């Protein structure tokens, strides 16, 4: 399934690219997009793993941009 | 982060007062240091947090290192100035990004807030559009935006469809007419019977498409992302080498001098201007296009469209109106009116475009009581009992099936035969009209360097040839079944020596496989047609063929703005790096190469949002009333 989230305070375009790369590399994620312009994360993964992956994604986002937070659902 | 807008001027005041004090005074140093902390403490904190997490090479880290380095080598004033300048730039950058995000989102904003649900007692409830069931009646007052797709049940009005189509001219609607969400009701109150739930209505599909569009990256963006991932570490390593290698080997080299040069490198190594420049340009281009009623499903499609040199068209509905107007009535016995009346009676209940044209040509209302037992025979025509006698209206196949012989004709159009009680009464000839500005649209494409125009049609050779000659099309392939169209398209794609991309434009009906196979698939007149929106890469909401040229212009402009931005960012950085290595640059210039370039790139990207209203010169009459097939 695919889910979209908003990322608040996403301030830097290259950070967004880094987040995308790291989130896409998480085991269980079949696709991830971080869109700097629309401030959206689109996550593609199995439904049952979605909850855990969301937390992992949140951790990655925070580690790259401390002020950015994941808001869901969109 | 927050309140940067106050911190920057405050720091500036302290900084200037510090500069006014004699060099070497501790007061001066204290003032400068205070200014530095006020303006830059968040950068330092973020850098610290970053290091704690084992992450270097981000902007905060690089700026902290550069300014602290400047303090260490005694360049106090410059350290403060750089931080102030950097933060000012960030302020501008945040503002510009925010503004552009909002401008583009605003261009695409068609979201209705609420729907007025009509209750049985005639009063209305204001509810969320998502909760309205199909079949309910909703009231739209003048000035309100239609929240859901439906059919007008009561009232007449003009609808402003510009948000969907970019078309300035309002469209008149009356009972029975289609009313699409996203339009604004202008003149009279309308009662609309809802035909689609909110999440399938035009407005939500468009919004979803627009939101997803920027997720599909252009090749340029993929390149710049890869480039910047290499760029930053390389420049940082060069900075390290620059700081320590020359002082070791060059006689008379001063360490602080080379460290200063290296600090410049660190500042310039920030990748943000690069990374933002391209997606922002495409984001602007997609927003600008949607304002003109052209929806691109991704930056990659705009990029491919910009390189188009071959356009392949479907004929019916794309270059022609697809309306089959009656062009000739040929009674064998009796009058023209009698023939039309019988045909109109038999076709009274049909929604087929041919039926609509016959009724339109007949003009007068008919008494439905005279018609019974209507059977539509798909691919043939219609059979009905009119005034007690069996009437057949349809093509040659229908007549052959009923063992009725027909006279031979050599016509270019579509023919409907009329038979009553086994007697051949005559025929009605239909001709599909070429859209008024189709020729102009193709000329525009040619003037933009599209040198191959091809038509694929399921129609007869004569009909296809006739249309193509009128339009100035190079090649016609006629008599094609849908699968033949794919094969022809593949031949064109495999043509040796093809340099540009191939665009296929169709109206989305039966075109899905061809739309998918082409480099770029255009769906024309897609407003209200789910199939077309689904299959195409770029969707033109109204029926205006000139929009194809507009889309091409927007795509080329967007690509060139993106290219300018990338070129500008890379070259400014390269120049400042070279100057820094030679000791000719200051930290100020380095900061400009970082945030200054970013701000300029953002401003330039915003140009992509502004679409020249060139298509206003194209006087196309494409009002949907002429498309009974679509309205049905």
Image (cartoon, rainbow, N blue to C red):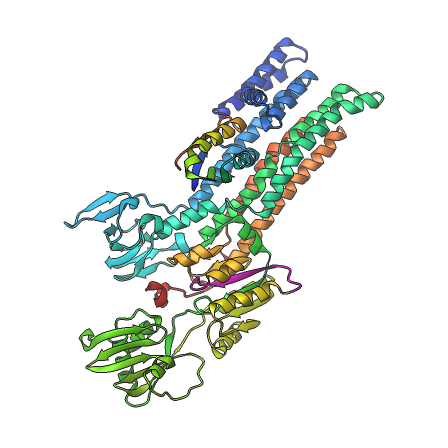
| Residue situated in front as seen by the camera: B264 or B395 | B395
Image quadrant holding the C terminus of chain B, namely bottom left
**Relative to the observer, which residue lies in front, B183 or B526?**
B526
Q: Is residue B204 left or right of residue B485?
A: left
**Viewer-closest of B611 and B273:** B273
Q: x%, y% of residue B236?
A: 68, 29
Query: Would you say residue B14 sits in the magenta stretch?
Result: no
Please name the residue shown 57% across and 71% down the image: B474
The answer to which quarter of the image holds residue B238 is top right
Q: Is residue B493 visible?
A: yes
Task: Residue at 80% x, 24% y: name it.
Answer: B246
In depth, the one of B163 and B417 nearer the eye is: B417
Helix, strand or loop: magenta stretch: loop
Residue B293 against residue B480 in the figure, above or below: above
**Residue B510 percent across, percent down from the top left:** 44, 64
Residue at the extreme top: B26
The magenta region covers B496-511
x, y percent for residue B588 = 65, 28
């Amino acid at each position: 399934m695919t889910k979209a989230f908003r990322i608040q305070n996403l301030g830097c375009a290259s950070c967004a690219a880094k987040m995308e790369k790291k989130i896409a590399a998480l085991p269980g994620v079949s696709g991830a997009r971080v869109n700097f312009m629309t401030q959206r994360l689109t996550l593609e993964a199995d439904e049952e793993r979605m909850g855990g992956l969301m937390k992992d994604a949140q951790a990655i986002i925070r580690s790259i941009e401390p002020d950015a937070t994941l808001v869901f659902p969109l | 982060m927050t309140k940067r807008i106050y911190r920057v001027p405050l720091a500036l005041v302290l900084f200037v007062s510090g500069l006014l004090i004699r060099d070497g005074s501790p007061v001066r140093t204290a003032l400068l240091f205070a200014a530095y902390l006020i303006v830059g403490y968040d950068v330092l904190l973020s850098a610290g947090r970053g290091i704690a997490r084992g992450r270097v090479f981000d902007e905060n880290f690089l700026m902290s290192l550069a300014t602290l380095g400047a303090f260490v080598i005694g360049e106090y004033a410059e350290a403060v100035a750089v931080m102030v300048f950097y933060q000012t730039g960030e302020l501008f950058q945040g503002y510009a990004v925010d503004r552009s995000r909002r401008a583009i989102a605003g261009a695409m904003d068609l979201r209705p807030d609420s729907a007025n649900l009509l209750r049985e007692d005639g009063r209305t409830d204001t509810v969320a559009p998502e909760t309205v069931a199909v079949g309910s009646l909703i009231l739209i007052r003048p000035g309100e935006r239609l929240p859901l797709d439906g059919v007008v049940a009561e009232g007449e009005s003009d609808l402003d469809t510009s948000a969907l189509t970019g078309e300035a001219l309002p469209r008149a609607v009356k009972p029975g007419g289609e009313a699409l969400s996203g339009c604004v009701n202008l003149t009279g109150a309308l009662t609309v019977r809802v035909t689609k739930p909110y999440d399938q209505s035009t407005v939500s599909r468009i919004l979803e498409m627009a939101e997803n569009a920027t997720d599909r990256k252009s090749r340029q963006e993929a390149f710049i992302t890869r480039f910047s991932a290499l760029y930053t570490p390389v420049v940082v390593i060069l900075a390290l080498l620059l700081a320590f290698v020359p002082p070791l080997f060059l006689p008379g080299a001063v360490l602080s001098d080379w460290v200063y040069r290296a600090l410049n490198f660190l500042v310039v190594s920030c990748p943000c201007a690069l990374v933002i420049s391209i997606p922002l340009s495409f984001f602007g281009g997609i927003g600008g296009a949607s304002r003109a009623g052209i929806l691109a499903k991704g930056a990659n499609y705009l990029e491919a469209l910009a390189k188009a040199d071959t356009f392949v068209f479907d004929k019916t509905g794309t270059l022609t109106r697809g309306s089959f107007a009656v062009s000739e009535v040929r009674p064998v016995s009796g009058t023209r009116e009698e023939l039309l009346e019988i045909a109109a009676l038999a076709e009274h209940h049909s929604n087929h475009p041919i039926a609509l044209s016959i009724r339109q040509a007949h003009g007068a209302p008919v008494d439905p009581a005279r018609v019974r037992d209507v059977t539509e025979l798909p691919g043939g025509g219609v059979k009905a009992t009119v005034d007690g006698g069996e009437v057949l209206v349809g093509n040659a196949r229908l007549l052959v099936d009923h063992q009725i012989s027909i006279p031979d004709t050599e016509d270019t159009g579509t023919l409907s035969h009329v038979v009553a009680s086994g007697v051949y009464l005559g025929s009605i000839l239909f001709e599909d009209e070429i859209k008024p500005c189709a020729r102009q649209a193709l000329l525009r494409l040619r003037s933009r360097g599209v040198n191959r125009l091809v038509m694929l049609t399921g129609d007869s050779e004569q009909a296809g040839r006739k249309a193509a000659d009128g339009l100035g099309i190079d090649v016609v392939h006629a008599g094609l079944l849908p699968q033949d169209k794919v094969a022809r398209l593949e031949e064109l794609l495999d043509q040796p020596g093809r340099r540009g991309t191939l665009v296929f434009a169709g109206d989305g009906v039966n075109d899905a496989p061809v739309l998918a196979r082409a480099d770029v698939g255009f769906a024309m007149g897609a407003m209200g047609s789910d199939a077309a929106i689904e299959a195409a890469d770029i969707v033109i909401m109204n029926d205006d063929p000139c929009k194809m040229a507009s889309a091409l212009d927007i795509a080329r402009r967007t690509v060139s703005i993106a290219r300018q931005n990338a070129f500008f960012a890379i070259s400014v950085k390269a120049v400042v790096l070279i100057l820094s290595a030679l000791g000719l640059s200051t930290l100020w210039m380095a900061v400009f190469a970082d945030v200054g370039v970013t701000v300029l790139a953002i401003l330039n990207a915003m140009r992509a949002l502004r679409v020249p209203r060139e298509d206003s010169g194209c006087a196309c009459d494409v009002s949907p009333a002429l498309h009974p097939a679509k309205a049905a």
